[in-house]
Amino acid sequence: MMQNPKNRFKEALRAGRQQLGIWNSIGGHSVPELLGGAGFDWVLVDCEHSAIETIDVLPALQAIGQHPETAALVRPATNDPTLFKRILDMGAQTLLVPYVQNAREAAAAVHAMRYGPQGMRGMAGMTRATRYGKVDNYFTSASDELCLIVQVETVEALNNLEAIAKTDGVDGVFIGPADLSASMGFPGQMTHPDVDAAVSDTITRLVAMGVPAGVMSLDVKTAQRYIDLGASFVAVAVDLVLLARAVADIQGQFRTS
């Protein structure tokens, strides 16, 4: 028998260590493997806003898992216990759950992460999570290494921030600037002063509560400012965006007219 693998991402959050991340939105084996070895602290496999289906999470986890120094996070398509069950059984230890609006929805996510009697996660023994039956006492120790991040991305969610963040079982809160910009009436304007102020204020509020705060910014200066405010885990790049920029750059070097 063996011990349940340690969740280094959760451990770092609890220790107050800031972690730099990158978004994986291109499915398959190669890109997650590349990102896992790129030197970031964490890679987020995105099933919400990409063509990555739940079944594609397994090879992504296997690819990133070749780099034990890098944590794999998974964003399910929605706050759904069936999706959680499948992804957790594949061996994911950290979920980032989108569009959590209130404490009730946060508690529902917690409930889906835990085995009974504290929750409703279905039990199966022969899974990658249990290392195919080799993890000693997995069903009683699993929750120790599972990490739940909930995403707040609307004005309503920010109004309910304290209740969401203080929900038992929530390990951190991630701010979604894109959807927040739409909710605030500035769709797509993630750098609008009002949106930026709301993001900054939310980070400050979470830090004051002692709750790890996460956010994404593809602008280096903005990302660094969020880090300086105390954000615990910050995503600074998206694989598909990097590819699109590189393609446009090389094309532009040959066609200037």
Image (cartoon, rainbow, N blue to C red):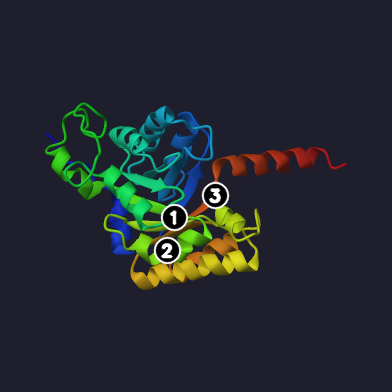
* Residue under pointer 1: 101
Residue 94 in view, yes or no: yes
Gap in angstroms between the C-alphas marked 1 and 3: 25 Å
* Residue under pointer 2: 160
Q: Is residue 201 left or right of residue 142?
A: right
Q: Is residue 35 left or right of residue 65?
A: right
Mark 1 or 2 closer to N-term?
A: 1
Q: Amino acid at mark 3?
A: Ala
> SS of the residue at dot 3?
strand
Which percent across, then down, holds residue 16? 33, 64
Which percent across, then down, holds residue 6? 24, 47
Which percent across, then down, holds residue 83? 37, 35
Q: Amino acid at mark 1?
A: Gln
Mark identifier at residue 237? 3
Q: Is residue 214 above or below residue 87?
A: below
Nearest to viewer (mark 1 / mark 3)? 1
Gap in angstroms between the C-alphas marked 2 and 3: 28 Å
